[in-house]
Image (spheres, rainbow, N blue to C red):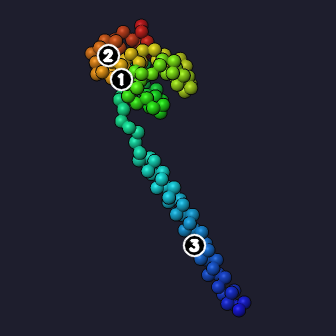
Amino acid sequence: MRKRMRALLPVVVVLALLIWWWLRRSREWAARRIEVRETEAEPPPGDELKRIEGIGPKIAALLQNEGIRTFASLAGMERERLREILRGAGLPFVDPGTWPEQAALAARRKWEELAALQGELKGGRRA
């Protein structure tokens, strides 16, 4: 009896290792599938916020991360809330004072009026 058990011991160990390996790999594969699904999910399309004078790529990405993806949503933001977002990102020197006004024009697709307003601005501020 002991001889049989000793003979089966390597087989049992190999089977246990195979089962352990298979379970570990299946968890990793499941995690990868979830990760791929999350990366494939794109945020809803929004407006090109960089068209607003004073908003560059970094600030546009910051606003989009805060859920501000359209001109209409930016137009409805309080200036103080925009300042809080900027301060939280380490950008306290940026003045969002005219962004809602510019965004309101852009949301209504009044590009000529927006261009005229932006002609009066320097870095998003009234000159």
What percent of the width, then of the height, locates residue 45?
A: 36, 36
Lateral position of residue 71 relative to residue 5, left or right: left
Secondary structure beneath disc 3?
helix
Q: CA distance from mark 2 to mark 1?
A: 10 Å
Of the 4 image quadrants, the one containing the C terminus is: top left
Secondary structure beneath disc 2?
helix
Front residue of 31/94: it is 31
Marking on residue 78: none
In percent of the image, x 39 and y 11: which residue is there?
A: 121
Q: Of marks 2 and 1, which one's residue comes earlier in the chain?
A: 1
Mark 3 nearby-residue class (10 Å; few <14, some 14–19, many ≥20)? few
Query: How many numbered discs, if any?
Result: 3
Disc 3, disc 1: CB below 8 Å?
A: no
Residue at the spot of label 1: 51
In percent of the image, x 64 and y 77: which residue is there?
A: 13
Disc 2, disc 1: CB below 8 Å?
A: yes
